[in-house]
Amino acid sequence: MAWVMMLAAVMASPDVFFVTVDTLRADHLGMYGYERPTSPNLDALAAKSLRFDNCVCEVPLTSPSFGSMLASRYPRSTATTRNGLPMPATVVRRLDGTMEVVQSSTYADFVRSL
């Protein structure tokens, strides 16, 4: 929750576009040096954006990884250690608190689109 407020204060509420892709090889993207034009739109977006090149996941599964990104918690603390497991209500309430801060900021339109 604090990171959202800090980011908004420091960066004066820039546009946020969170791109996630399941099962994509980075070595087949132009932005990482691939010679074939496989990703012209992503390459153009990356050229003018903040890009995180060294990212790792705690669990190489979609559901635990997405839950962790959205809740800012390790999969074992969200109880979503494999695909198909629902996030417990206690974690969802914590995530709702973070979303309330985001909704009260200039990121409200982004949150509504989730």
Image (cartoon, rainbow, N blue to C red):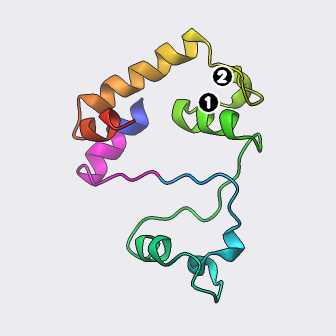
**Quadrant of the snapshot with the N terminus:** top left
Name the residue located 60 percent from the left edge and 38 percent from the top edge. Answer: 66
Q: Is residue 78 above or below residue 89?
A: below
Q: Is residue 58 above or below residue 80?
A: below
Say whether residue 25 is magenta: no
Judge from the rendering whether residue 48 lies leftward or rightward of residue 91; answer left or right.
left
Q: Are marks 1 and 2 in contact (CB under 8 Å)?
A: yes
Residue that mark 1 sits on: 73
Query: Looking at the picture, which amino acid does disc 2 mark?
Result: Thr
Q: Which mark is residue 78?
A: 2
Q: Residues within 10 Å of mark 2 (few under 14, many from 20)?
A: many
Q: Nearer the viewer, residue 99 or 27?
A: 27
Judge from the rendering whether residue 88 lies leftward or rightward of residue 84; answer left or right.
left
Which element type, helix, strand or loop, lies under badge 2?
A: helix
How far apart are labels 1 and 2 at the CA level?
7 Å
Query: Looking at the picture, which amino acid does disc 1 mark?
Result: Arg
Q: Which residues are magenta?
A: 6-18
Q: Nearer the viewer, mark 1 or mark 2?
A: 2
Name the residue located 72 percent from the left edge and 25 percent from the top edge. Answer: 84
Q: Position of residue 25 (x, y in %)?
A: 71, 66
Q: Residue furthest bottom?
A: 35
Q: How many marks?
A: 2
Q: Residues within 10 Å of mark 1 (few under 14, many from 20)?
A: some
Q: Which mark is residue 53?
A: none
Q: Nearer the viewer, residue 39 or 3?
A: 39
Q: Is residue 58 above or below residue 56?
A: above
Judge from the rendering whether residue 21 lies leftward or rightward of residue 18; answer left or right.
right
Name the residue located 57 percent from the left edge and 84 percent from the top edge. Answer: 37
Q: State which quadrant residue 100 falls in.
A: top left
Q: Earlier in the sequence, mark 1 or mark 2?
A: 1
Q: Position of residue 85 (x, y in %)?
A: 71, 21
